[in-house]
Amino acid sequence: MLVFKNLEEMEPYLDKKTDTYRFEDVVQFCFDLRSDSNISAWDINAWNIDAGDINAWNIDAADIDATDIDVGDINAWNIDAANINAGDINAGDINAANINAGDIKAGDINANNINYYAVCIAYQTFSCMSVRGRRKNAIHACLDGEIEYKEMSVREEKGEAADV
């Protein structure tokens, strides 16, 4: 496992031709990572990630803000991305915006609130409290079953902050 405490420690892994940090290992970021560069790694464990494109097998993070995310599994609290292409998504809130056809595509989606642009598709299972497309004819569906809507607590219905 590679452990980084600041951006300077990551410099040897930067491919300047493609503007991509390349890690052929499990990576742990012990700081809030903010970079315009892309990230390519096997597994990512981080608190907050703000990067161009993220390509990894697994991502475990509190907040992810990226242009494109291409990953096997995502376990995160908040995801804000242009495109999400994932095997499985287990998240608190997903906020995705894409101006072409593919917003969110995953094998399984388990999230609280999902806000996307045009398309949100789960292949096998889809569970959430709410899902909403911003485009007039937006589509969300689960190909192998129905979308399971979780019950909201009274606090969530009123929009109150939860105890942390």
Image (tube, helix red, strand yellow):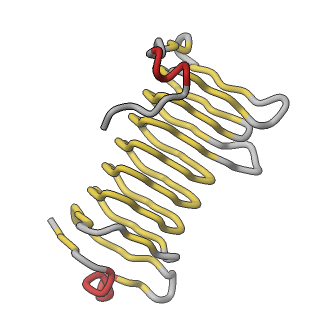
| Residue sitting at x 52%, y 64% | 53
Residue 3 in the image, given as x and y percentages of width and height: 18, 70
- Report the quarter where the C terminus lies: top left
Task: Depth check: give the residue in front, 41 or 110.
Answer: 110
Examine the rendered structure and indicate whether residue 39 appears above or below residue 160: below
The residue depicted at 71 percent of the width and 32 percent of the height is 133
Q: Residue 105: where, in percent of width, then height?
A: 56, 37
Q: Quadrant of residue 22?
A: bottom left
Residue 108 visible from this viewpoint? no
Q: Going by the picture, which residue comes out furthest to the right?
A: 136
What residue sits 46% from the left and 45% below the top? 78
Q: State left or right for residue 120 relative to residue 76.
A: right
Picture quarter containing residue 121? Answer: top right
- Residue 162 is situated, as x and y percent measured from the top left of the image, at 39, 31
Q: Would you say 23 lies left or right of 50 here?
A: left
Say above or below: 12 vs 105: below
Q: Position of residue 111 (x, y in %)?
A: 46, 29
Evaluate whether residue 110 shows in this view: yes
